[in-house]
Amino acid sequence: MGTLVIHVVDAYDDSPVPNANVRVYSSSGRPVGVEVTDHNGIAVINMPDVSGEYVVEVKDQIHFDKKVTISYPMQRSIKVKLVKRTWGK
């Protein structure tokens, strides 16, 4: 079993996004792991020994949600850039 490192940052200034919810699913929709980013915007998910495509879903209160498809284990580390929501504009 390996790990997938997800680094979640703000798309505007590349600053870390702490406390973002990160979920990883297999290509068939089966949940693989759930984690919350730390103060550096990093979440580490334990991955199964099965190679293939996986979906990384990131949700945060002040950013738009984002889904990214990856090929594991070719991609063991990814950066996900989130765009801030703007209210009242």
Image (cartoon, helix red, strand yellow):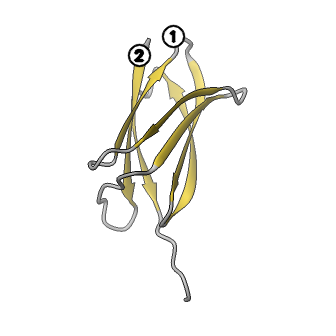
Q: Decide: is 55 above or below 89.
A: above
Q: Decide: is 18 above or below 69.
A: below
Q: Decide: is 30 above or below 42.
A: above
- Left or right: 42 as drawn, with respect to 28: left
Please give the residue where the numbered disc 2 appears in the rendered image: 2
Residue reaching furthest to the right: 28
Marks 1 and 2: CB-CB under 8 Å?
Answer: yes
Instruction: Tell me residue 21's x, y (percent).
Output: 49, 46
Instruction: Tell me residue 28's x, y (percent).
Output: 72, 26
Q: Residue at x 43, y 55 (%)?
A: 81
Q: CA distance from mark 1 to mark 2?
A: 7 Å
Q: Residue at x 44, y 51 (%)?
A: 20
The one of 74 and 81 positioned closer to us in this rendering: 81
Give the amino acid type for the residue marked by disc 2 in the picture: Gly
Q: Residue at x 37, y 68 (%)?
A: 12
Please give the residue where the numbered disc 1 appears in the rendered image: 49
Instruction: Tell me residue 9's x, y (percent).
Output: 36, 55
